[in-house]
Image (cartoon, helix red, strand yellow):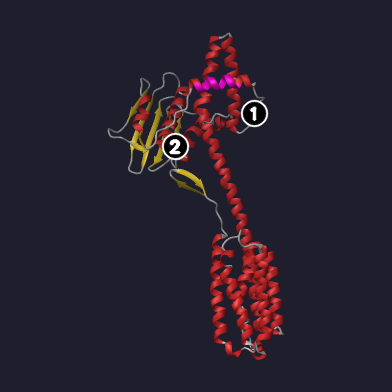
Amino acid sequence: MRQRTGGRPRAVRMSVELPLWRALTGYRILTLGYALTLFLLNYREYAHPLGAALYMGVLTLWTLLTWNRVTSAERCTKPFLIADLTIALAGIALTFFVDTAERIHAGGATLPSIWTGGAVLGLAIKGGWRWAAAGSTLVAAANLLERGSAARDTVHNVVLVWVSSIAIGYIVEVARASERTLARALQIDAATRERERLARDIHDSVLQVLAMVQRRGAQLGGEAAELGRMAGEQEIALRSLVAGGLLPPQPSAAQLAEDAELVRTVAPTAVPPAGPCDVRALLAPHAGAAVSVSAPGTPVLLEAAAAAELAAAVSAALDNVAKHAGGGARAWILLEDEPDAVIVTVRDDGPGIPEGRLADAEREGRMGVALSIRGRLRDLGGSAELVSVPGQGTEVELKVPRGSEGT
């Protein structure tokens, strides 16, 4: 999962085990109190009360001194669990020597009583159902030996501890597997979003520059044509990368350096300012002879990062109009300031988008609509709706909810 600190996402480790460890800590302390209460109430009935009192003192010190050892999986080590179980088993065995035969046959509680369950649960949480089965089996054997017979109530308690501990151990294993799967899914999702963000930036800058260089080089001829050819090769390689396909053979380092210098010169990266931003100011530069911009008379404020992403999506939509709607096409931008969202509609009077063309474009690596428009709005928690009727133009509605931030 991710939390925000100072406006930036921060990764937080998820753990389904933490509540179980906390519950086990409380269980050990509460059951210690229960065992001490039983011992004090029946102190005079023991055959050797001093021996029983000595064990209860050891049990109390052990529990209080090690209470924080069961607060996490890292602190609850295997040697500690073995020692914990050993103390529980010793208490059960000692009951046979310090208690009277009448109380034992009558079903009297052992010295550690239900505190023993904490040792078994610790094994279940730490090692899963196999550790739980081993621990509960030892506890069951110790109880049967202490009682001297398989009485109904003894068998009932033994089976209850055995089944419950194994069930909890199995649940813990399933929870761990689910946690690992979720963590992997979150990693894949984060990597996918980062890849899409990079693809949008490539589409909005590098690919457009390379396409422009290729066209101009072909028009000028000579050495410029060779530069255009190299730019075309780079455009194909980058489009393959954006589409997730295999890259063709890489150009030389000198070619890459020349192309990088050209991109830095022609398309420098702009960093949006911090704080609220007026979306009108970002859309106003698009106004011209072929593009009309309609906006409210008052500022339309969004967080700077969200406003920049929205403006970039509008630019991508206008680029599509310029490329596919024809030289004589007109476009209209309508900015609406709603109480819960900011809506920008981009409409043109071009020929529209043929059915299936968007899917074909994605397969070809042309991701303008998929990434530069829909991908940006999705990352902002908004939506991008595209309606196109052949012969009647295309309309793109971009909606950004209030409080959105760029991720």
Is 262 contained in the magenta span? yes
Task: Specify whether 343 is left or right of 117.
Answer: left
Q: Is residue 27 above or below residue 306?
A: below
* First reached walking from the N terminus: tag 2 or tag 1: 1
Disc 2/disc 1 C-alpha distance (Å):
32 Å
At label 2, counting other C-alpha atoms closer than 10 Å, the crowd grade (few under 14, some 14-19, many 20 or more) is few
Of labels 2 and 1, the one closer to you: 1
Task: Specify whether 270 is left or right of 293.
Answer: right
Quarter assignment of residue 392? top left
User: In the rendered structure, which segment of residues is drawn in magenta?
Assistant: 256-264
Residue under the point 66% across and 26% down: 248
Magenta: main secondary structure: helix
Task: Specify whether 171 is left or right of 291.
Answer: right
Front-most of 365 and 54?
54
Q: Quick one: which residue is furthest to the left in this view?
A: 297
* Residue where numbered disc 2 is placed: 385
Q: Secondary structure at mark 1?
A: loop
Residue 405 position within the rendered picture, expressed as x and y whole percent measured from the top left: 43, 40
Q: Quick one: which residue is furthest to the top in this view?
A: 222
Quarter assignment of residue 132? bottom right
Residue under the point 43% across and 43% down: 7
Q: In the drawing, what numbered circle is on residue 247?
A: 1
Is 112 contained in the magenta span? no
Residue under the point 69% across and 82% down: 146
At label 1, counting other C-alpha atoms closer than 10 Å, the crowd grade (few under 14, some 14-19, many 20 or more) is few
Residue 256 position within the rendered picture, expressed as x and y whole percent measured from the top left: 60, 22
Front-most of 291 and 168?
168
Residue 381 position within the rendered picture, expressed as x and y whole percent measured from the top left: 44, 42
Q: Is residue 74 above or below residue 8?
A: below
Q: Residue flagged by tag 2: what amino acid is it? A: Glu
